[in-house]
Image: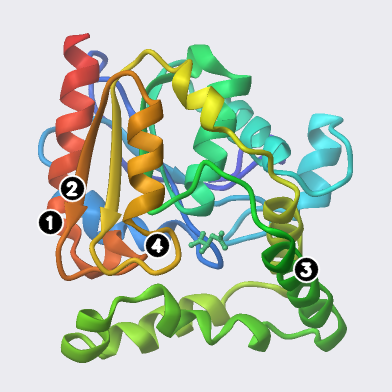
């Protein structure tokens, strides 16, 4: 479903009024499909939905989304967050448990800052509240330029292996092909827009310190991209956080070991229901 030219939303389940809906924000360079296993494992009848972020999956390009929002045309995580907020509201969701993995976590933190009334609970999975260093930022801009110049996404295909932990690469080698397949399904413009948006993102550790609601910080034990130290930094900043380390998983916890991820998200959502 695409709402008013905003983001495409995949609704996994529509539940009754009462339980606070769960909004899942995917990582880069992927789309909502990285939540399929977790969504299937979530108990209960809570509404669960997952937008595709600008330019990825079935969503319109970042430029089109910024145009629809009358936002500055420069790629930004803020524009992605504004698009998620507008899309959720158009879907009738005024308050949600917002959980994002990696890039989705950057967007979730921007939502907590820019649309605090929407974020009843915050799930940060395999993500960082800090900015890139200069080398990482330059690398992102190089990749953005390469995919646009080549008209292909080959420059990010290698991420399929990097996103997965060593245990998954050994014991679930089929996941490499699955993640590559998802990456091949993205367009160069969406890859470039996302890289530029991530390169420009600010440090949001102070936003976490100001977030009073229930929070979850989750990290794969083998995550080399947003490692345990990043998760500990976020958990220390958040006033009410539970920290969960997922065994036998790298950066893509929701795909590599979905059971503990679903259990942790359900526990977060129940804390929000009770708050
Ligand atoms: C992701 O999984 O979303 C990316 O690793 C985020 C990033 O490149 O910082």
Q: Residue at x 22, y 9 (%)?
A: 275
The alpha-carbon separation of the residues under discs 1 and 3 comes to 36 Å
Tell me the tag on residue 33.
4
Name which of mark 1 and mark 3 comes first in the sequence.
Answer: 3
Give 64 or 168, whichever is nearer the viewer: 168
Q: Residue 29 in the image: x percent, y percent?
A: 56, 67
Give the labeled residue for mark 3. 138
Res 238 quadrant in image? top left
Q: Where is residue 55 shown, x and y percent of the image?
A: 69, 58
Label whose residue precedes the other's in the sequence (3 or 2): 3
Query: Which numbered disc flags the more N-terminal residue, 4 or 2?
Result: 4
Q: Secondary structure at mark 2?
A: helix
Relative to 99, is 256 on the left or the right?
Answer: left
User: Which dot, 3 or 4, sits closer to the camera?
Assistant: 3
For the point 60% across and 44% down, the residue is: 2
Callout in the foreground (1, 4): 1
Examine the rendered structure and indicate whether residue 130 appears above or below residue 157: above
Q: Mark 2 CB in 8 Å range of ligand 1?
A: no
Q: Position of residue 58 (x, y in %)?
A: 59, 59
Counting from the top left corner in percent of width and height, residue 80 is at 66, 41
Q: In the depicted view, which residue is nearer to us: 184 or 192?
A: 192
- Asked if residue 159 is positioned above or below residue 54 in the image, the reply reads below
Mark pair 2, 1: CA separation: 5 Å
Q: Quadrant of residue 184?
A: bottom right
Residue 23 appears in the picture as rendered: no
Q: Secondary structure at mark 4?
A: helix
Q: Which residue is mark 2?
A: 262
């Amino acid at each position: 479903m695409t709402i008013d030219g905003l983001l495409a939303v995949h609704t996994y389940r529509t539940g009754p009024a009462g339980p606070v809906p769960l909004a899942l924000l995917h990582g880069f360079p992927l789309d909502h499909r990285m939540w399929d296993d977790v969504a299937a494992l979530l108990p209960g009848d809570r509404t669960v939905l997952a937008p595709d972020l600008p330019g990825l999956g079935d969503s319109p390009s970042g430029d089109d989304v910024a145009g629809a929002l009358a936002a500055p045309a420069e790629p930004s995580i803020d524009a992605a967050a504004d698009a998620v907020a507008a899309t959720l509201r158009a879907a009738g969701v005024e308050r949600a448990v917002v959980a994002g993995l990696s890039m989705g976590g950057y967007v979730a933190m921007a939502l907590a800052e820019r649309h605090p009334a929407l974020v009843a609970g915050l799930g940060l999975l395999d993500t960082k509240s800090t900015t890139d260093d200069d080398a990482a930022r330059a690398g992102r801009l190089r990749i953005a330029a390469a995919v646009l110049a080549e008209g292909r996404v080959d420059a990010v295909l290698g991420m399929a292996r990097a996103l997965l932990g060593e245990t998954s690469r050994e014991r679930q080698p089929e996941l490499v092909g699955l993640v590559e397949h998802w990456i091949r399904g993205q367009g160069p413009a969406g890859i470039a827009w996302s890289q530029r948006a991530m390169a420009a993102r600010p440090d949001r550790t102070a936003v976490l310190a100001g977030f009073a609601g229930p929070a979850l910080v989750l990290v794969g034990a083998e995550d080399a991209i947003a490692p345990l130290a990043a998760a500990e930094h976020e958990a220390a900043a958040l006033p009410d956080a539970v920290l969960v380390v997922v065994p036998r998983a790298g950066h893509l916890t929701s795909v590599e070991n979905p059971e503990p991820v679903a259990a942790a998200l359900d526990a977060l959502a129940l804390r929000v229901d009770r708050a």
